[in-house]
């Protein structure tokens, strides 16, 4: 079996006839990209064209073809978690025809047939499938299915083909509704020029808040100032597995011993909200599923990173599932609880 697999997609047009091919391939390790040849009766031999790496081309009738491909999020746990499905979106003549259509199954479902090509003609689309195994990824009989196509049934995509200046570049971090201190939020972004990279923060801590105070494999403790002269312990209880891929942040009195309170049995609670009934008086929780902090996401699946701004400590919350919105939320720990400061949205590729 391959150590890793990489999905590829491209589009090829035949300039002297009204036919185009969208094709897909999966390479193992460092193997070269090889797209399978489709039956000549289906694509008039267009799929023998060498690899071009194009995402845009134009048919003889003037139709522009655009392809954008991507993958779902990979996870370091679960069956097939490191092998996510691959998908694509397709535009013809500036109209979105397919959006996030899956061509490669994943998450342990790779036994299903894989889409290896779509042949585009003015009156029909031919979908071609083949079985797939990592041992022989380019073998197996190809089966193609024709579906009627009528361009006028699809609306023009004003987002994809908007004026270049009307939409911020992909990856831009924007302040969203709910931001209470925009000046501080912009300063935060200047302190993190690379944006928000990754959501698992159990190993890397940007503010170096937990340098050497680990009291267990998944519990770290630091002393912070929540207001002038008021000190509290900040406790981070972390997980990076299928059942608990997140952080629970707790504020406790300085004399508290979290190692005697936080037990694995507390993770057995099946509710989405962290149960506080087993915590001593004076403890407070900052976690997912709380008002103002991903109320729709379980406490088990929100991670926290730290950042000092003007001498104060803030927590950046990011959901483990990167499709959850908003992209991130910056909160300020208080003597009891927290206050939402910034809400961030990252401009994502348009699918």
Image (spheres, rainbow, N blue to C red):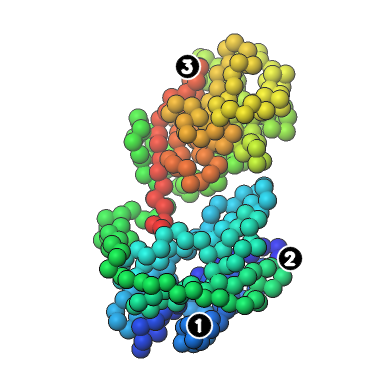
Query: Quadrant location of residue 248?
Result: top right
Q: Hey, which residue is sitting farthest top in the picture?
A: 281
Mark 2: give few (<14), some (14-19) or many (20+) Cα within 10 Å: few
Which of these two is toward me, 139 or 325?
139
Query: Is 160 drawn above or below residue 243 in the view shown?
Result: below
Viewport quadrant of the N terminus: bottom right
First in sequence: mark 3 or mark 1? 1
Q: Nearer the viewer, residue 314 or 89?
A: 89
Question: What residue is shown at x 47% (from left), y 23% (from top)?
Answer: 338
Q: Is residue 139 left or right of residue 56?
A: right
Classify 70 as above or below 259.
below
**What distance separates the C-alpha of mark 1 from that of mark 2?**
27 Å
Which quarter of the rendering shows the C terminus? bottom left
Residue at (33, 61) in percent of width and height: 160
Q: Quadrant of residue 259?
A: top right
Which numbered disc, 3 or 1, marks the residue closer to the eye?
1
Q: Tag 3's secondary structure?
A: loop
Residue 328 percent location from the top left of the image: 46, 39
Is residue 75 something that shows in the picture? yes
Please tell me how crowded label 1 is: few (under 14), some (14-19), or many (20+) other residues with Cα within 10 Å: many
Q: Which residue is tagged 3?
A: 228
Q: Which residue is mark 1?
A: 47
Q: Which mark is residue 1?
A: 2
């Amino acid at each position: 079996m391959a150590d890793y697999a990489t999905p590829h997609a491209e589009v090829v047009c035949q300039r002297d006839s009204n036919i185009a091919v969208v094709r897909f391939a999966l390479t193992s390790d460092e193997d070269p990209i090889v797209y399978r040849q489709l039956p000549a009766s289906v694509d008039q031999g267009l799929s023998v064209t060498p690899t071009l790496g194009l995402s845009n081309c134009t048919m003889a009738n003037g139709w522009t073809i655009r392809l954008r491909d991507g993958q779902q999020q990979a996870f370091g746990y679960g069956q097939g978690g490191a092998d996510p499905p691959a998908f694509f979106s397709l535009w013809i003549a500036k109209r979105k025809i397919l959006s996030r259509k899956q061509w490669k199954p994943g998450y342990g479902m790779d036994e299903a047939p894989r889409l290896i090509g779509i042949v585009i003609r003015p009156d029909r689309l031919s979908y071609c499938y083949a079985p797939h195994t990592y041992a022989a990824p380019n073998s197996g009989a190809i089966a193609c299915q024709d579906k009627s196509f009528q361009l006028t049934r699809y609306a023009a995509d004003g987002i994809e083909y908007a004026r270049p200046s009307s939409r911020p570049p992909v990856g831009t971090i924007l302040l969203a509704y709910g931001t209470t201190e925009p000046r501080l939020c912009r300063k935060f972004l200047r302190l993190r020029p690379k944006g928000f990279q990754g959501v698992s923060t159990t190993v890397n801590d940007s503010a170096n808040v937990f340098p050497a105070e680990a009291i267990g494999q998944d519990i770290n403790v630091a002393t912070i100032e929540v207001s002038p002269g008021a000190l509290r312990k900040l406790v981070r209880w972390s997980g990076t597995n299928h059942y608990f891929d997140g952080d629970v942040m707790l504020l406790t009195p300085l004399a508290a011993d979290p190692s005697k309170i936080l037990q694995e049995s507390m993770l057995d609670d099946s509710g989405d909200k962290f149960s506080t009934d087993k915590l001593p008086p004076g403890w407070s929780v900052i976690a997912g599923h709380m008002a103002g902090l991903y109320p729709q996401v379980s406490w088990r699946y929100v991670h926290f990173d730290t950042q000092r701004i003007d001498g104060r400590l803030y927590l950046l919350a990011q959901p483990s599932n990167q499709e959850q919105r908003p992209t991130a939320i910056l909160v300020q720990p208080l003597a009891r609880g927290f206050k939402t400061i910034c809400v961030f949205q990252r401009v994502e590729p348009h699918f």
